[in-house]
Amino acid sequence: MSGVLSTLRARAVDVKSDERRALGLAFVFHFIVLGSYYVLRPIRDEIGAAGGLENLSWMFTATLVAMLIANTLFAAIVARFSRRLFIPIAYRFFILNLALFFVLMRTLPAGQQIWVGRAFFVWVSVFNLFVVTVFWAFMTDIFNTEQAKRLFGFISVGGTLGAIVGGSLTASLVQRLGTANLLIISALLLEGAAWCVRFFPAQFKGGHAGAFRDETGNAERPIGGTLWSGITHAIRSPYLLGICAFMLLHAVTATLVYFQQADITRAAITDRTARTAFFAHLDIWVNVLTVVVQISLTGRLLKWLGVGLTLAMLPAISFVGFLAIGLMPGLGLLAFFQVLRRAMNYALSRPAREVLFTVLRREDKYKAKSFMDTFVYRAGDQIGAWSYPLLTWLGLGLTGIPLSPRHWLPDGVL
């Protein structure tokens, strides 16, 4: 039996004996972080669809402003505290925010709930990038480049499983518990993520290529630097600017697809609770495909093809997908493209992109990476958000697609 388990583990991930504890902790950590977010994601998507495209663009603008403020606050705590302190501080700040939204959703009259919903949309759009980028910054600070190529694919599986569980909780409980009570579940998961940092070893061994890097005496010191060093380093480095360009283009195209999704689902599904359940099911489909690719292909492709070619796969899929929609517009094809594109981003592009950050100095892993993963990404969202209404006005949008959702929506949604 032990031989069978060893064979299965070897096929799933190439891990050395002294890496197993950290790999297991990283797997659980990522599971909890993504589980917490995916409880909230369908709620955010429903608010975006209900608000209409005319308000969605402004909410993306508010998100960009909020992201710049959040980056400044995060850089301040990174400069003054060790990673074992500033990571839990960041997560518990978001827990307090969730508590505030819970109270507002339960106490304010219906007439004011629209503003609570819009604020919640902006907040979740900031929350999702920050909790994930803080996790991955920690991972790039722990594992070296050689380890990242072998292990990041498997660590990503933990996040995907967490996303499946989080989306399933919302899909199955939203009609019984209501939207506000789901925030409690998300907050409890996020508290678990804050505790995960404590279980990683205080010091890592140095030595052979498979061991952890030796940062004894340095890993837990405050990183220091200025509030703006992450921004200035990202702008001055050609290496980081290249990553910024990749992320910006990805975000622009992702937002265009997201706006089309919001437009169609608003017209196709009139009940808000059913719409939330639909978005949760869509997330489940994405994450099931993601976990299959992560287990069977991600680690192998990173070793066989390298980081560059693995990153190039998502732009190639996007090009073919947009070309197909342009030639043969249809709702089913749009849904298929959205699921495939998101899954390949999570399964291939995200782990490969994180490997690029392992070679950076520690300040850039937390500050420059945070700026790039959040503000630069949301800047791409902003470009896409204001491009969509313009393209629609010019007659280049997909809003004329016939709405025939019953042949591909899950049973019981309509």
Image (cartoon, helix red, strand yellow):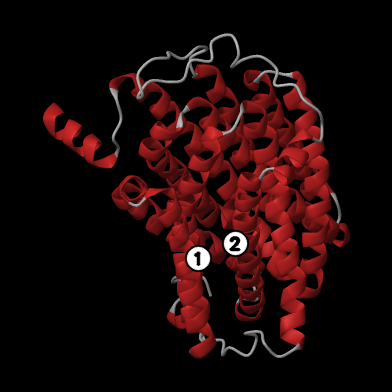
Q: Quadrant of residue 137?
A: top right
- In the image, is 285 to the left or to the right of 115? left
Between the C-alphas of marks 1 and 2, the distance is 8 Å
Q: Are marks 1 and 2 in contact (CB under 8 Å)?
A: yes
Q: Which mark is residue 250?
A: 2
- Residue 191 shows which numbered tag? none
Q: Residues within 10 Å of mark 1 (few under 14, many from 20)?
A: some
User: Where in the figure is residue 406, as x and y percent of width and height?
Assistant: 48, 81
Q: Quadrant of residue 53?
A: bottom right
Disc 1: which residue: 315
* Residue 236 locus on image (x, y percent): 73, 43
User: Quadrant of the rendered structure where residue 222 is?
Assistant: top right
For residue 10, say whether it is visible: yes
Q: Is residue 335 visible?
A: no
Judged from this view, the residue extending furthest toward the top is 217
User: Horizontal placement of 49 versus 296: left or right?
Assistant: right
On the image, the x and y values in percent for residue 336 come to 45, 73
Q: Amino acid at mark 1?
A: Pro
What element does badge 1 sit on? helix
Which of 328/31 is in front? 328
Question: Which residue corresponds to the image point at 69% horizontal and 38% vertical from the top-left?
Answer: 368
Residue 254, given in percent of the width and then of the height, sits at: 60, 65
At label 2, the amino acid type is: His
The earlier-in-sequence mark between 1 and 2 is: 2
- Looking at the picture, tell me which residue is in the foreground, 46 or 241: 241
Q: Residue at image x 53%, y 15%?
A: 215
Please tell me whether mark 2 sits on a helix, a strand or a loop. helix
User: In this picture, is 377 found above or below 230?
Assistant: below
Q: Callout 2: few (<14), some (14-19), or many (20+) C-alpha neighbours within 10 Å?
A: some
Residue 355, compared with residue 413, is above or below; it is above
